[in-house]
Each structure stands twice: as C-alpha cells, then as structure tokens.
Amino acid sequence: MAGLQPMKRAAIVGAGQMGMGIAYVTALHARVPLTLHDPSPRVLAASLKKLQTLFTRDVEKKRISSEDGEAAMSRIKGVEGSLVGGGAGLEGDTDLVIEAIPEIPDLKLALFRNLASILPAPAILGSNTSSISLTKLAAAAGLASGKGPADAESLESASRVVGIHFFNPVPQMKLVEIIPALQTSDATLERARAFGLACKKEIAVSKDSPGFIANAILMPMINEAILTLEKGIASPEDIDKTFRLGMGHPMGPLALADLIGLDTCLAIQRVLHTESGDTKYRPATLLVRMVDAGWVGRKGGKGFYEYP
Ligand code: CAA
C-alpha cells in the first residue's frame, strides 16, 4: 500500500516450522530486522540453522546474491525465552509482532494480554493462528489496560490485533490470509496487508469466522480422507494418488496432513468443532489416536507415512 511506512522491527514468537518460515520472508523479502523468540534452545538453534541453510541454498541457486543472503541472515536475532509472561529480548522499536506458537487458546490469550501490556501503540499484534478467533485474542489484548472492553484504552489495544496467516511451507506458498477481528482498526488492517505484500505474498481477506477461508474448507477434506482410511476404503497411497493425479493437487490430503502436523490438524479441528458446533468438524478417531501415539507427521518422523 503506497504511503505506508515500512515496519521498523518485527518480533516473531515461536520458532517452529511456521515461525521459521515467517522469519525467512520477513528478513529476505520485507527486509525487516527481527527477533525470533522461542523458549526451547533446541528449537531455536534448529530454526536458525535451517534459515542459514535456506539462504545459502538461495545463493547457490542464484535466486539471490550472496550479499542479500548475508544481509537477510544478519537481520535475524534469536532470543531464548517465552513472551507469554515478561518481555525479555523484545527490542524497544518493535512495531510488529507475529505469533506462531502452538494452537492452544489459553496460551495465545495469555500471550496477547502480555504483548499489549509491554508493547505500546501503534505496534501491531499479529497472529498466525489457523483457527482461533481473532476477536477473542483482541479482547485479551484489551484486558491489558485493566479497564472494561468498551473503554478507549482497551479499544485501542484491541484495535492493534489482526490475523496474518501464512501457509506451510511459508517460503513456497504465495498466500497470506488477513483476518480482522471485530475490534481491528482500518489502519492495522492496511499495515498488515502492506506487510504481506512486502513479503511477496498475495492477500486474501477473511472475516473472523471459524477456520477463516482456508481451514474451514481444507480441514473437512483432510478429515474425510482420514475417515476414508479408517473405514478401510483405500490405502493412504491410493487416497493421495486420487487427489494428485485425479485432481491435480500438488500433494494428497494425507501427505498434506503430515506436512501441516497431525497435532496441528487436530487442534484446528477441535477449535472448529467447538466454535461452530457443527459435527462435520468432529475429528476422526484415527486422527486422535495417532496424535495420542505421538505420530504427528513429518516433523515427528511418522504420520500416515514414514519420514526417516
Ligand atoms: N519445508 C520447506 N520447504 C519445502 C518443504 C518443507 N516441508 N517441502 C518442500 N520444500 C521446498 C523444497 O526444498 C524446494 O525448494 P527449492 O526450490 O529451494 O529447492 C521447493 O519446496 C519445491 O520442492 P520439491 O521440488 O521437492 O517438491 P514439490 O515441487 O512437490 O513442492 C511443496 C513441494 C511446495 C510442498 C508442494 O508439494 C505443495 O505445494 N504442497 C501443498 C502444500 C500446501 O497445501 N500447503 C498449505 C498447507 S495449509 C497451511 O499451512 C495452513 C494451515 O493453517 C494449516
């Protein structure tokens, strides 16, 4: 959007596969310096290593110059610690936060309340949530003022919250879903849109409805594929082949569920089911049991397929 100031500094909360990918596009394409926060030193170190590998590969494949690769990596500073309480490592000029922590409602609500209390307006408080209501997250940010939800200070805090939802793998997927909460201001919405465009993504705007656009449609498809497997109708390979070769999808629904993470798919479906009350979002028992077993897909080495 012409005329909008670029972001000065971003903070990306959560260095898992989504946070890592968001750090990649923020540093390389939007050219915004950032802090990448995670409580686990192991996750943080793996994420920084993967980022270095991605930039190195971009240079080797001549997609970017070595100067651009080095500049992108130098914009990223890893910070060990949680922002659910406290603000350790958050730089004072941070004007954009994007959280990509696990899809656990209480954790996200606590994070937004804390972020609103430590980062003054007009810093934007963005969420990469796949399914949690932005309006609820904005209300949590409003609580930071200690006043009622209709108070001007609460409204200002809440107006800075917006959904900025990336897709996995973030470097490859060309879309960002932007989701305004009921409380989101037009200025926040436009700054989020400008940031998505700076990351070289196309934008789709969705109302704050369960699952927004993408997951309201994708999750029932994935769940139906799991039910098809559970009922013994076809093998994982044949279910996925049907979508790849019969419908031209880049990957079948079970391989995609493994890529997203079965724990994430389950968490999204649980939110959709609870929020909508619609039985079409009830997760397949097989999905629940696989997560119980710790088989969470590609990131854990085993899901519907094996990943040695
Ligand atoms: N993480 C990071 N990068 C990956 C990757 C992964 N898991 N898988 C593949 N890539 C990269 C490869 O390294 C390769 O990069 P280079 O060009 O730098 O070498 C590039 O993607 C292409 O990979 P391949 O040639 O090996 O394979 P491909 O052409 O089949 O593409 C794919 C792989 C991009 C994953 C493709 O299969 C695809 O588009 N799949 C669909 C993914 C999708 O639907 N994502 C959305 C999930 S929904 C979501 O994320 C939202 C939510 O809320 C749940």
Image (cartoon, grey):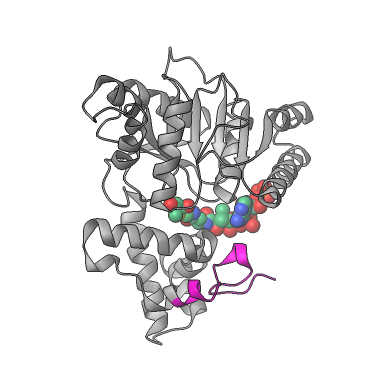
Residue 306: percent from left, percent from top: 62, 74
Taking the image in four quarters, ligand 1 sits in the one at bottom right
94 up-or-down from 135: above or below: above
Name the residue at 49% across, 52% down. 102
Decide whether the magenta segment is chiefly helix, strand or loop.
loop
- Left or right: 293 as drawn, with respect to 142: right
**Res 185 seen here:** no
Q: Residue furthest front?
A: 146
Viewer-closest of 173 and 273: 273
Q: Is residue 147 magenta?
A: no
Residue 168 x, y percent position in the rendering:
52, 51
Locate residue 86 relative to residue 280 in the image: left or right: right
Where, quadrant-wise, is the C terminus in this rendering? bottom right
Range of magenta residues: 289-308
Where does residue 221 sit, x and y in percent of width and height?
A: 35, 65
Determine which quarter of the picture holds residue 57: top right
Q: Is residue 209 visible?
A: yes
Seen as rendered, the residue at the extreme bottom is 232
Residue located at (34% from left, 62% from top): 270
Q: Which corner quadrant holds the N terminus?
A: top left
Residue 104, horizontal then vertical, whole percent: 43, 53
